[in-house]
Image (cartoon, grey):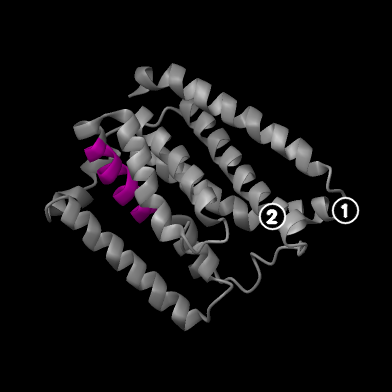
Amino acid sequence: MSGIYLVNNYSTDIYWQKSALAIFVYFISILIVANFNLNIFSAKEYFGKKINFKLLLFVIIGSMALYLFNYLVVTVAKIYLFNSFNISNSNKNVDIISIFSIVILFPFFEEIYFRKYIAEILNKVKGFKFALLMSTFIFTLPHIYSENGLLGAFVGGLTLGFIYLKTSNFWFCFICHSFYNTLIFVISKYLDNIIFENYSIIIILSILMVLMYGIFINELNKRCEKFK
């Protein structure tokens, strides 16, 4: 998620310098947290748990709710605070390798670091609530300059942390994060066109977002113990 806003603001060379540096920092940070135990990158660490597709459906709903929340926050701010709403160019001049890094690489390393290790360690030491809030805070700081700002990153951290701490499954978090980043490429421009014609659509999207978050939280609370 943190890499997506670099694409439109920097040249390819600088983007890849920043991307390589970010991935390297995540890699070293993961090793430090794991006491330089290289076994953390073993396939057994990630393929040991099955993905329940019924539960995955609600994870996807949570990802869509998160996308709508962040999209609406940014859109409302542009319209009513800055009076500068225009059609998104989020997919303009973005090559396939950049998309791969944003949709696959960044979510993979971020979820290993912020959820599988930070959130899991904090959960074991301090419990669910502390782990959720502190891992969210730690996740929010590197995203301070993203277009969604601190609020969007904080809600994203809460959503992804909730998924991991409830399911103890890295892949649910990775899929949610990756799907969220994909939605930015696929949907944002179309929503911009619709809202540009009729601002009242914001109300409908807001209601849909609340309903989706309600379903997501309720179903994970009910099902997570069963599928751990």
Question: Residue 80's quadrant in the figure?
Answer: bottom right
Q: Count numbered badges in the picture.
A: 2
Q: Residue at x 37, y 39 (%)?
A: 133
Q: Nearer the viewer, residue 121 or 183?
A: 121
Residue 137, how many percent across, how many down?
38, 47
Label 1 residue SS:
helix
- Above or below — where is 71 with respect to 168? below
Question: Residue 142's quadrant in the figure?
Answer: bottom left
Q: Residue furthest front?
A: 81
**Three-letter amino acid code at disc 1?**
Glu
Q: Nearer the viewer, residue 162 or 78?
A: 78
Q: Which mark is residue 77?
A: 2
Q: Residue at x 53, y 29 (%)?
A: 58
Q: Earlier in the sequence, mark 2 or mark 1?
A: 2
**Three-letter amino acid code at disc 2?**
Ala
Q: Does residue 210 appear in the picture of this structure? A: yes
Task: Say whether residue 218 is left or right of residue 83.
Answer: left
Q: Residue at x 49, y 69 (%)?
A: 97
Residue 169, how many percent across, how many down?
34, 35
Label 2 residue SS:
helix
Q: Examine the structure image and report whether residue 120 is included in the region drawn in magenta.
A: yes
- Badge 2, how many Cα within 10 Å: few under 14, some, many 20+? some
**Disc 2 vs disc 1: which is toward the camera?**
2
Q: CA distance from mark 2 to mark 1?
A: 17 Å
Q: Examine the structure image and report whether residue 116 is included in the region drawn in magenta.
A: yes
Q: Residue at x 51, y 70 (%)?
A: 6
Q: Which residues are magenta?
A: 108-122
The residue identified by callout 1 is 197
Q: Quadrant of the C terminus?
A: top left
- The kind of secondary structure the magenta stretch mainly shows is helix
Q: Does residue 168 appear in the picture of this structure? A: no
